[in-house]
Image: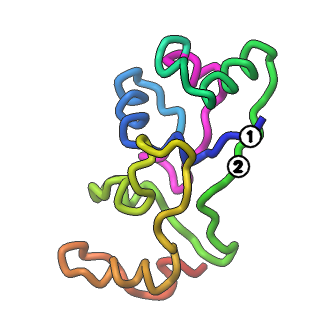
Amino acid sequence: MRISADSLQSSLCIKIRKFNQQSVSNVDKSPHANVPSTAVCMNCHRVVKTDSPWIQKLTEAYNNNQPIQWVNVHVLPDFVYFNHERHIQRGISCDTCHGNVAAMEKVEQVSPFTMGWCINCHRQPENQAPLNCNTCHR
């Protein structure tokens, strides 16, 4: 079974994880957003949004003790370093880059994630973001 990893990145999921005191994605504490186990997902999805075909697939995988093959939607080139933690700590909403994932039937990339797109955001004076090359290229 394949489910988009970015479907877990909605601010609602982050709030739920913090409420449950589970750092299952580490998006707010790590450079990378990790995907939780199906058991963690099922803590809520045993009762939440059970009519969704995607949650039904998740439930089936969980009941059959099968891992989920997550599909990456937002993929950056290997030579680019991106740190989710820095952005979350600065108060940048997931929606800023990923769109309203919670409202998407199927997660899709809504921002180009090109160097120019990122630099334009970093250049905004209110963001006070670094512009040196080694911020993203290591």
User: Disc 1 residue type?
Assistant: Arg
Residue 56, position as x, y percentages in the image:
65, 22
Answer with the quarter of the image where residue 20 lies. Answer: top left
User: Viewed as shown, does residue 128 lie left or right of 100?
Assistant: left
Answer with the quarter of the image where residue 93 lies. Answer: bottom left
Asked if residue 17 is positioned above or below residue 51 in the image, the reply reads below
Residue 73, position as x, y percentages in the image:
62, 57
Q: Residue furthest left?
A: 126
Q: Cα distance, mark 2 to mark 1?
A: 6 Å
Asked if residue 118 is positioned above or below residue 55 in the image, the reply reads below
Asked if residue 105 is positioned above or below residue 48 in the image, the reply reads below
Answer with the quarter of the image where residue 16 lies. Answer: top left
Q: Which residue is mark 1?
A: 2
Residue 59, position as x, y percentages in the image:
67, 19
SS type, badge 1: strand
Residue closest to the eye, 128 or 73: 73
Q: Earlier in the sequence, mark 2 or mark 1?
A: 1
User: Disc 2 residue type?
Assistant: Val
Residue closest to the eye, 34 or 46: 46
Seen at 18% across and 74% down, the residue is 126
- In magenta, the rendered stretch is 26-45
Seen at 47% across and 78% down, the residue is 135
User: Viewed as shown, does residue 103 lie left or right of 68?
Assistant: left
Residue 127, position as x, y percentages in the image:
24, 72
Q: Which residue is mark 2?
A: 71
Q: Is there CB contact under 8 Å for labels 2 and 1?
A: yes
SS type, badge 2: strand
Seen at 61% across and 45% down, the residue is 5
Q: Which mark is residue 105?
A: none
Residue closest to the eye, 42 or 80: 42
Per the picture, the main secondary structure of the magenta-coloured stretch is loop
Sort mark 1 into few (<14), some (14-19) or many (20+) by Cα contacts within 10 Å.
few
